[in-house]
Image (cartoon, rainbow, N blue to C red):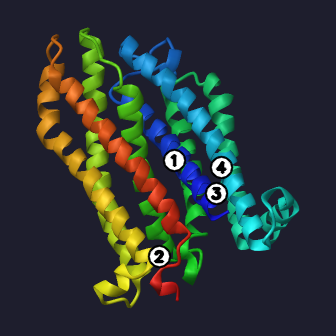
């Protein structure tokens, strides 16, 4: 059951990261574009947007809808598994316990708030997005989606180790910001490496112009996000380790070993991202200004994909860490 719980939490974290990354990538793709009469896949955003941008945006809309639905299902699964673990019952025999857990406990109330926010996101993606008729409406829609995603993330933080002093405390706020920043980083790297930039951008000038805009926004977001991740992550580590002041106390605990593994993986992924940002991206942007294919384009994407693989492992380790008691809890 413990392994199933880890896998369900990993699926939840992964789907949430992809959902947040898809929404952010839609914003990056539409940055700098102005409103036009043809909605297509960017809800009317045209400067005339290239077919590359339109195709990518269409994929992102599908990814956003699917990942939100999976996040909702995985969240329900995590609740169900938690009920089975608490009641010490087989999974298939714990449905009634899950309903009681959802309606009568702090964990369940947080789940219901998060689930309600996700239902709004699904509803907007499937129904309201088709009715968007202006650039202003699109921005309002994106703001509502961002608020709902923020509410869901907060519902996750209030059932984490950070809630020991209450639902509305600095520790929960820091954990919430950390969760959002990590999910954004993981999601936008996965989306960029495995979807938006997975295929060659082509030689058409408007394709390459839109790609420059997207890559630049992606880089700025990841760079500033990493700064926030290390700050909030450091504060989370300080809270989680409590009064532990020796290396052996950390390496001898399951929480400490898992935490160290996560830190090493995050540093490795950040190093790849930094290499891409400072050594590969300048040449990439210069190459995209021209109408010739350049090896830098493929190299940038390959490094993104390697970073994405490491981050997939990171969120699995984070799933294990979330169910491991920190030294401060003992």
Q: Quadrant of the N terminus?
A: bottom right
292 shown above or below 191: above
Q: Quick one: label 4, few (<14), some, or many (20+) residues within 10 Å?
A: many
Residue 161 against residue 247 in the figure, above or below: above
Q: Is residue 189 visible?
A: yes
The spot of residue 281 in percent (x, y) is 17, 34
The Cα–Cα distance between marks 1 and 2, rounded to whole angstroms, is 23 Å
User: Can you identify the residue that label 2 sits on?
Assistant: 171
The nearer-to-camera label among 4 and 2 is 4
- For label 4, the residue is 74
In the figure, 283 relative to 101: above or below?
above
Q: Indicate the quadrant where residue 207 lies.
A: top left
Which residue is located at x 50 percent, y 21 percent? 58
Residue 18 image position (x, y, % from top left): 49, 41
- Which one is closest to the eye, mark 1 or mark 2? 1
Q: Which residue is mark 1?
A: 14
Label 2 CA crowd tier, 10 Å (few <14, some 14–19, many 20+): many
In the image: residue 80, left or right of residue 24:
right
Q: Residue at the spot x=30%, y=47% of the render? A: 222
Helix, strand or loop at mark 2: helix
Residue 243 placement, left or right of 150: left
Reading the image, the residue beneath label 3 is 4
Q: Nearer the viewer, mark 4 or mark 3?
A: 3
Dot 4 or dot 2, earlier in sequence:
4
Say if mark 1 contacts mark 3, CB within 8 Å. Answer: no
Gap between marks 1 and 3 measured at Cα:
15 Å
Marker disc for residue 242: none
Which of 271 and 40 lies nearest the eye of the viewer? 271
- Answer with mark 1 or mark 4, whichever residue precedes in sequence: 1
């Amino acid at each position: 059951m413990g392994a199933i719980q880890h896998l369900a939490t990993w699926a939840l974290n992964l789907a949430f990261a992809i959902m947040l990354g898809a929404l952010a990538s839609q914003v990056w793709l539409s940055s700098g574009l102005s409103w036009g009469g043809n909605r297509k896949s960017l809800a009317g955003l045209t400067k005339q947007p290239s077919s590359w941008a339109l195709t990518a945006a269409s994929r992102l809309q599908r990814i956003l809808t699917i990942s939100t639905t999976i996040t909702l299902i995985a969240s329900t699964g995590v609740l169900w598994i938690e009920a089975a673990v608490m009641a010490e019952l087989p999974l298939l025999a714990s449905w009634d316990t899950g309903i009681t857990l959802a309606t009568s406990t702090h964990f369940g109330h947080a789940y219901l708030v998060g689930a309600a926010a996700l239902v709004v996101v699904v509803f907007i993606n499937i129904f309201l997005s088709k009715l968007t008729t202006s650039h202003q409406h699109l921005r309002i829609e994106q703001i509502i989606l961002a608020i709902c995603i923020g509410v869901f993330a907060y519902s996750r933080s209030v059932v984490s180790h950070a809630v020991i002093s209450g639902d509305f405390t600095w520790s929960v706020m820091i954990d919430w910001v950390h969760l959002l920043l990590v999910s954004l980083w993981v999601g936008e790297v996965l989306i960029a490496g495995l979807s938006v930039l997975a295929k060659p951008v082509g030689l058409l000038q408007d394709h390459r112009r839109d790609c420059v805009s997207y890559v630049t926004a992606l880089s700025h977001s990841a760079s500033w996000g990493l700064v926030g991740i290390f700050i909030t992550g450091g504060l989370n580590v300080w809270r989680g380790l409590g009064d532990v002041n020796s290396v052996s106390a950390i390496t001898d605990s399951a929480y400490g070993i898992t935490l160290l593994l996560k830190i090493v993986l995050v540093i490795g992924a950040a190093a790849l991202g930094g290499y891409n940002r400072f050594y590969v991206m300048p040449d990439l942007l210069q190459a995209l200004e021209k109408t010739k294919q350049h090896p830098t384009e493929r190299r940038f994407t390959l490094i993104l994909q390697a970073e994405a693989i490491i981050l997939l492992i990171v969120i699995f380790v984070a799933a294990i860490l979330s169910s491991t008691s920190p030294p401060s809890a003992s």
